[in-house]
Image (cartoon, rainbow, N blue to C red):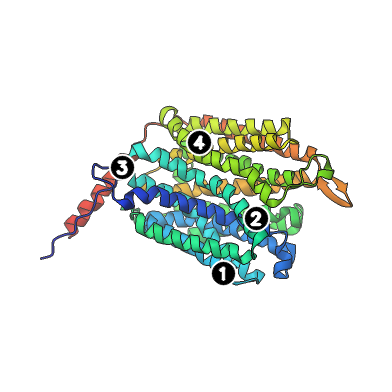
Amino acid sequence: MDQPAAIPPPPGTGTPLRLRDRLTIPVLASGGILMAVMQTVVVPLLPDLPRLTGSSPAAVSWMVTATLLAGAVLTPVLGRAGDMYGKRRVLTAALALMTVGSVLCALSSDIRVLIAARALQGAAASVVPLSISILRDELPPERRGSAVALMSSTVGIGAALGLPLAALVVQYADWHTMFWLTSALGALGVTATWWAVRESPVREPGRFDFLGALGLAAGLVCLLLGVSQGGTWGWGSERVLGLFLAAVAVLALWWWQQLRSARPLVDLRLVTRPRVGLSHVAALLTGFAFYANSLVTAQLVQAPEATGYGLGLSIVATGLCLLPGGVTMLLFSPLSARISATRGPRITLALGAAVIACGYALRIADSRDLWMIILGATVVATGTTLAYSALPTLILRAVPAAQTASANGVNVLMRTIGQAVSSAAVAAVLVHHTSPLGGTPVPTLHGYLLAFAMAGAVALAACAAALTIPGDEPADDGRRARGATRGARDGAMEGA
């Protein structure tokens, strides 16, 4: 009779750490950075892609829109799938889809193929919530806070690294080279994740809610398509208004269906609890405030010197201006974890939002000198680190272990919606504040300052939302996760 195979305990429970266990955090963090890099690398290409692909600027813009829509739809869906079928399995699949999309971009110059490939890459938006859920299940409480903070910061770190990297490749090599490079990194990420990351035993069994996934996808596509294309099609156009009305109708029906489903895609009763719901509201507002920093800074420093305020910097130099913010996010993530451990994550979130507002105050005070622009952008990045690192910790303390990935997926979705609305709002402000330069309208400095003021006001609203979140208790998720691990191990032993 075969003897049952021993199931190793999770790392941090008194046994020496294997090499794979020691590499779990770096591998997951590198996956988050790679995801953010993959989303950013196309930005320097946008001005030249119409010529390179023989397509219109409107068609090229879909290379960004497709990734946004796919990421928004797939993040909560893959989060739920991870809770049900295994987080490492779904995480590896998301990284694999991202890599396949990169290979297709490297092989083709057809705009239709490129848009479809960028939609595949949108699946990688689920990497961060899935990784955070794995860290909750696998790490002891004393290591979890700093690891989750680092994982949350990878979004900003990757974005700060991706822009100058892509600009350098585009400037000195064929543009397909950039996608071959990201393909190789993606393949390495898939292999490392499968090798170094344990499959979590914490599951929530049941049937997958395909009807709920379809309804959420339809509603989000209508909403985000209207937001992202409103400036191009016209905010009062029939197409945009129709999309918004369709989004309201579809999401209302989806909400009704979710409340009556035995195994919903999103547990709305959990979402409506103040600790969870207010965390999602804060995530939306923080995403709005954070994204304006990258959008406006890049345009401001690249504006021609003839405007009187622009610095006329190249794309490479622009990326280097944002790089200190990425380095700051990496350095400040441990501080965020310490503040959350001593004062609670809602205080960390409120502090981060307040720091973002201070950064925009610096931008309003002086947006002409390069060093002040970099300082202001770096302060905003610091506040973003504190806020983004606190958000998943709030979710971890408020939801059961078996729903961690799906709940964090919804939280990331709210950030994505906030970023999409920020992009549309900033564009609307800048379009309405222009002056002619050589026959071409360009944004005025007043328009940029209004955008900063708008983002700063939203950051203060995020701070207020954070302070209204009910006080968080010391988390017992570590005991629950270890208890689930022991239960799964004992069940496997009994079954054997």
> Does the image show residue 252?
yes
Left or right side of 145 for 121: right
Which of these two is toward me, 349 or 445?
A: 445
| Pointer 4 residue | 332
> Which mark sits nearer the N-terminus, 2 or 1?
1
- Residue 411: percent from the left, percent from the top? 51, 46
Task: Identify which amino acid the numbered label 2 is placed on.
Answer: Ala
Disc 1 + disc 3, Cβ < 8 Å = no
Q: CA distance from mark 4 to mark 1?
A: 36 Å
> Does the image show residue 405?
no
| Pointer 3 residue | 480
Q: Which mark is residue 91?
A: none
Q: CA distance from mark 2 to mark 1?
A: 20 Å
| Pointer 1 residue | 104
Task: Identify which amino acid the numbered label 1 is placed on.
Answer: Leu
Label 2: state its secondary structure. helix
The quadrant of the picture occupied by the C terminus is bottom left
Q: CA distance from mark 2 to mark 3?
A: 46 Å
Left or right side of 481 for 267: right
> Which mark sits nearer the N-terminus, 1 or 3?
1
- Residue 427: percent from the left, percent from the top? 73, 48
The quadrant of the picture occupied by the N terminus is bottom left
Q: CA distance from mark 4 to mark 3?
A: 29 Å
Disc 2 + disc 3, Cβ < 8 Å = no
Task: Identify which amino acid the numbered label 3 is placed on.
Answer: Arg
Label 4: state its secondary structure. helix
Q: How many marks?
A: 4
> Which mark sits nearer the N-terminus, 4 or 3?
4
**237 to 456, vertically: above or below:** below
| Pointer 2 residue | 167
